[in-house]
Image (cartoon, grey):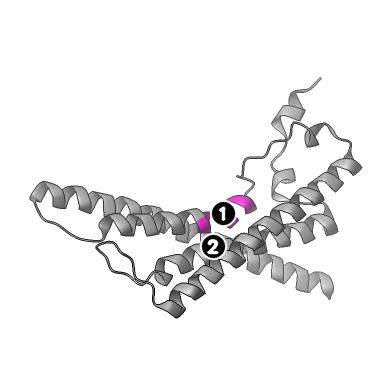
Amino acid sequence: MIKTIATTIDRALGRLYTACGAIAALSIVLIALFVAIKIISRLLGVYIGGLTEGAGYAMAAAGSFGLAYTFQHGGHIRVDLVIGKLAEKPRSVAEIGALVLTSGAVLYLAWFMTRMVNISWKFGDISSKSDGLALWLPQFPAALGFCIFGVALIHNLIRFCATGASPWTTQGDLLAEKDP
């Protein structure tokens, strides 16, 4: 029963991370689109306001939504100079410690960004740039992306403690494979 529930939650979170990856990819396409429109409009002598800001907002969304997806697929850069040399038991303890510290830092950042969105909403902050957009609108996707990344870290902490499986252990350690 518990294994079925855990598997269902694991699959649902996997779909959430994949959706985040799709949103990040769409945001990158939007950046390219905004930049292309900006270049073409400048060549035609036409001013279209908010394109630079829109590209910046899309970049923030791409960066934050891409975190959970990239982490889940073992794509984050890890420095294993010390941990990679440890025996299995101390390495597991170090991995858990790293996940706990990273989770704490990311969850604090997510809380802070969510608080920033709330303050922007309450005070009706408006962008001072040419788009005149309510600031909570571009801040919300970035905060949501960090919240989902925090969920991914906690999810993988629980998975690692329960099974020893994680995105970075399934990728293989190429340096360790080459050692004699």
- Residue at the spot of label 1: 67
Residue farthest to the top? 180
- Mark 1: amino acid: Leu
Secondary structure of the residue carrying tag 1 is helix
Mark 1 or mark 2: name the one nearer the start of the chain. Answer: 1
- Mark 2: amino acid: Gly
Q: Is residue 69 magenta?
A: yes
**In x, y percent, where is residue 45?**
8, 51
Q: Is residue 39 magenta?
A: no
Q: Main secondary structure of the magenta part?
A: helix
**In x, y percent, where is residue 148?**
60, 64
User: Looking at the picture, does residue 12 appear above or below residue 29?
Assistant: below
Label 2: few (<14), some or many (≥20) within 10 Å?
Answer: many
Left or right position of 36 against 44? right
Residue 15 in view: no
Q: Which mark is residue 145?
A: 2
Front-most of residues 119 and 7: 119
User: Looking at the picture, does residue 121 appear above or below residue 38?
Assistant: below
User: Looking at the picture, does residue 159 appear above or below residue 98?
Assistant: below
Residue farthest to the bottom? 122
The N terminus is located in which quarter?
bottom right
Q: Which mark is residue 26?
A: none
Q: CA distance from mark 1 to mark 2?
A: 7 Å
Left or right position of 73 against 35? right
Q: Where does the magenta region start and end? A: 64-71
User: Looking at the picture, does residue 174 appear above or below residue 156?
Assistant: above
Contact flag, marks 1 and 2 (Cβ < 8 Å): yes
**In x, y percent, where is residue 20?**
52, 61
Front-most of residues 134 and 1: 134
Residue plotted at (80% across, 50% down): 97
